Structures are given as C-alpha cells and as structure tokens.
Amino acid sequence: MRPVAGALALAALLLPLASAGQESMTSHRVSGVVLRPDGQPASGAKVVVVANDSMSEPVYTDEHGAFSLDSWPIGDTLVHASDHGRSARVSSSARPEAGLSLTLVEPGTIQGEVRLPKRAHADDLQGYIGPAGVSALLPGVWWGPKPKFKGNRFTIENVPAGDVQVFVGSEKLKLAGQSKVRVEPGRVSTVSIDVQRAESRVHGLVLSATTHKAIPRYQAFLLLPDGSPEAWYLPGPEFSFVARTAGDRVLLFTAPGYKSKRVSVHLEDGQSSDIGQVLLETTPPR
C-alpha cells in the first residue's frame, strides 16, 4: 500500500503546479509605464485594460508612472491611459515581455455640421463619440464629451487623439447618422454628417443580475452584422436605439466589473421592439 500512498502524495503535490502552469498559459500580467508628453513619468494616471469584451476596474500609476494588472487573457488586449485631458492607448496581441509604454498626448477638437433631410429641423439633435472601429476588443474603453449644438452645427472639445466615431441623431425625429474622424493632438478636425430617417427602434432596461438595480457606468452598442457600430448609447438605465434600416442586429452591453453580454435582435421596418430586462453578471476579482 505504501507505493500507492506515495503516488497519491506526489499527485497532490503536482496538481497545484499543473493548475498554476495551465493558468499561466491562458492568462498574463499586463504592466507598463505611462509618460507625460515631455517624457517624464505620469503619476496618478488612470489605466484600464480591455480584453474579450471585458474591461478592468481602473488602476492608477505610481510615482514612477508604472501600472500592473494580473491575470488577463492572452490574446488581443487594449490598454487605455488618461490624465488631465491627455490620453494614450495601445494594443498588445501577446504577452508583453518588456511591458508597455504609453505616452500621453493632448486632446483635440471636432467641429461639424449635420446635413438634415428636407423639411427636418435641427431641434432635439444629440450626439456622442467613441473609438472608431468598435469590435470585441474596444467597447467600454472610453466615451468622449458630448457635442454642443447650435442649430445644425456642433463642437466637441477635449476629444482623445486618434480615430473616433461621431454619432448624431434624434430619437424624437427618428434621425440617425455617423462618421469617422481623425483627431490630431491640439488641433481642430472638421466633419459633415448626413442623417437619414430611422424607422426601426429597439429599447430595454439594463440591470445587475445580482441586485436587479441599475448599473451606473454601462455602455450599449447597436452593431451591424459586420460588427461595426450603428449606434452607441450611454447610461439610462433604460436604453433606446433607432436604426436606419430593418434587419438583424446585435446589442452589446459592457460595464466595468461586469461580464459583457450580446443579444441578437431582428428589427422590423417601422416597428418598435422591447427586449425587456438585460441582466449583466459581475466578473470575479482578478
């Protein structure tokens, strides 16, 4: 019986090592340093990490500009840093062996014009912005300041540098449009956006699956079949989208500390679809 007992004891010792090895193969630590535009460490900068539709709770850099988050899935990862209006983001598709380096840059400004259909007025226009090319990697990273409208013209200040998507429209008037804009640090970018009649609508309510209460910082996306965004919604807790055409869509919901959720919907021309409650589950601590 002693050889059997010895084998069991050996197995008991090896199991934790095997589990640790398996975890190291599926997850990694995301770490790096955030620098100011002058190259000096950015102390107190906020850093979030996004992977597989999940976003970390924010962490803040130390006096050396360093940050670290443990146990993030290996694969496409996006790191976003911000501090006093400056921002930087970088993608990593593997385990960053030497850590990441992000240099903050000044925000820019967008000035634009909304081109309306005939007999449509500029009343009740609204807008919002987010990173361009939203995919499974990007939702939840940041949402920018809202446009300030004067008639059919708008200005958006303090926009993070890089490619952004500008959404404009009016649920009351059933109008929707969007455009991609390249924002340069410290400069003004211009854009003209055509809005069209949006005849289909989908709405619902986002709650925590644990408490059944509203989630304060969630984001919702209405995605086209190719994964590109048709609309982006900021917290309600009720959400409502208007779509320019009927057909299949995917609703994507994401929030810090919660598992993201995708819901497939089919929009009928001229109809309103109520999908009821969307419950988001909390993510385990990392």
Image (cartoon, helix red, strand yellow):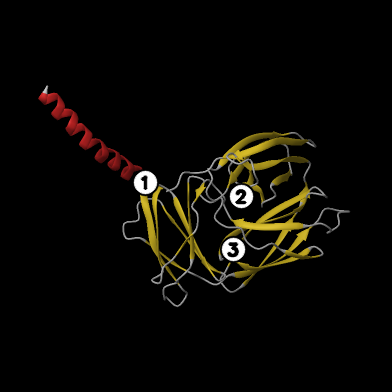
Foreground of the two, 116 or 11: 11
In percent of width and height, residue 175 lies at 78, 50
Amino acid marked by disc 1: Ser
Amino acid marked by disc 2: Tyr
Instruction: Tell me if 62 is positioned left or right of 111 in this view.
Output: left
Q: Residue at x 71, y 57 (%)?
A: 127
Instruction: Tell me if 281 is positioned left or right of 70 in this view.
Output: right
First in sequence, mark 3 or 1: give its number: 1
The numbered disc on residue 218 is 2
Q: Quadrant of residue 185?
A: bottom right
Residue 247 in view = no
Q: Measure how far apart labels 3 and 1 are at the Cα level.
A: 33 Å
First in sequence, mark 2 or 3: give its number: 3
The numbered disc on residue 201 is none
The numbered disc on residue 182 is 3
Instruction: Specify the farthest residue to the bottom.
Output: 38
